[in-house]
């Protein structure tokens, strides 16, 4: 049995619980991969609506190494916020994404990222555009396939010249990583990965090249 995780601060436990609850909102059967060592914990999840990796970190009192994939719901149930600890549930068979994580090092800053206000504004504009285009569809064309096509077109757009898909920014806001207009943000690149980083967590997306970027389309019925 894996020993409990002891957080450096009870607020770390509460923040992790909030992150897990948001993941479960998008996938009740969500799994997360935990990696810990040297007093730090990284929790990786993949909300299916966005097809990105969401990463939440926390400071631990424990130094023991840990690398395991578990049920997000069971981990959430095992968090004792007042005690600042979490019971690690039994491992589960990891989904394919859990075996392909971003690199730990080699990151460099990618220029051209708007500030948090600009990013939140871009998401709001995308949501408004989807709703306006959806409302204009004739009744006979308001199908799931057509709405998915519009969503893919909107959310596959990149942010400025950065190559970051707009869906990654939407994921960051939806998961609580962009809670306000004055959050410091940064965009980092390493190999085929881009990572949108804020003090509340990171969103990583794997891309093919950082210049002429090609991204995999995502099913996105409703940006709202």
Image (cartoon, rainbow, N blue to C red):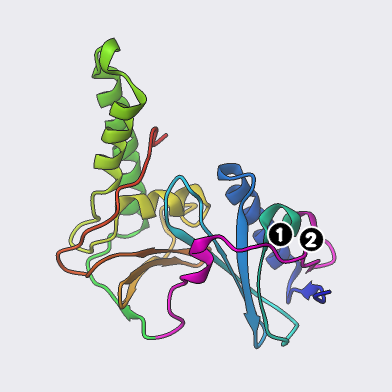
* Image marks 2 and 1: residues in contact by CB distance under 8 Å: yes
Quadrant of the rendered structure where residue 152 is? top left
Residue that appears at 63% across and 71% down:
34
Determine crowd level at label 1: few under 14, some 14-19, many 20+ residues with C-alpha closer than 10 A: some
Q: Which mark is residue 96?
A: none
Q: In the figure, 165 relative to 125: above or below?
A: below
Q: Is residue 181 left or right of residue 79?
A: left
Residue that appears at 26% across and 17% down:
141
Determine crowd level at label 2: few under 14, some 14-19, many 20+ residues with C-alpha closer than 10 A: some
Q: In the figure, 12 relative to 180: above or below?
A: below
* Residue position marked by numbered label 1 in the rendering: 14
- Note whether residue 149 is visible: yes
Question: Mark 2 falls on what kind of element?
Answer: loop
Residue that appears at 73% across and 56% down:
76
Question: Mark 1 falls on what kind of element?
Answer: helix
* Residue position marked by numbered label 2 in the rendering: 81
Name the spot of residue 39 as percent of width and height, x first. Answer: 67, 84
Location of the C terminus (image quadrant): top left
Quadrant of the rendered structure where residue 58 is? bottom right
Q: Nearer the viewer, residue 143 or 163?
A: 143
Magenta stretch holds residue 101 = yes
Q: CA distance from mark 2 to mark 1?
A: 5 Å
Name the spot of residue 120 as percent of width and height, x first. Answer: 36, 48
Name the spot of residue 163 as percent of width and height, x first. Answer: 23, 62
- Note whether residue 201 is visible: no
Q: Which residues make up the magenta segment?
A: 77-105
Q: Is residue 105 left or right of residue 157?
A: right
């Amino acid at each position: 049995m894996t020993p409990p995780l002891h957080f450096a601060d009870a607020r770390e436990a509460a923040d992790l619980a909030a992150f897990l609850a948001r993941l479960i909102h998008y996938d009740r059967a969500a799994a997360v991969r935990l990696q810990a060592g040297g007093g730090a914990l990284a929790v990786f999840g993949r909300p299916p609506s966005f097809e990105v990796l969401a990463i939440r970190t926390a400071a631990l009192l424990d130094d023991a190494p840990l690398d395991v994939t578990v049920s997000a719901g069971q981990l959430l149930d095992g968090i004792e916020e007042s005690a600042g600890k979490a019971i690690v549930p039994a491992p589960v068979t990891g989904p394919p994404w859990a075996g392909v994580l971003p690199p730990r090092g080699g990151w460099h800053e990618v220029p051209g990222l708007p500030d948090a206000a600009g990013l939140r504004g871009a998401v709001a504009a995308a949501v408004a555009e989807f709703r306006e285009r959806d409302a204009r569809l004739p009744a006979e064309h308001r199908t799931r396939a057509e709405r998915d096509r519009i969503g893919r077109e909107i959310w596959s757009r990149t942010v400025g010249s950065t190559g970051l898909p707009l869906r990654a920014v939407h994921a960051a806001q939806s998961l609580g990583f962009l809670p306000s207009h004055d959050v410091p943000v940064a965009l980092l690149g390493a190999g085929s990965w881009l990572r949108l980083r804020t003090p509340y967590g990171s969103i990583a997306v794997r891309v093919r090249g950082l210049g002429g970027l090609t991204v995999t389309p995502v099913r996105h019925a409703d940006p709202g």
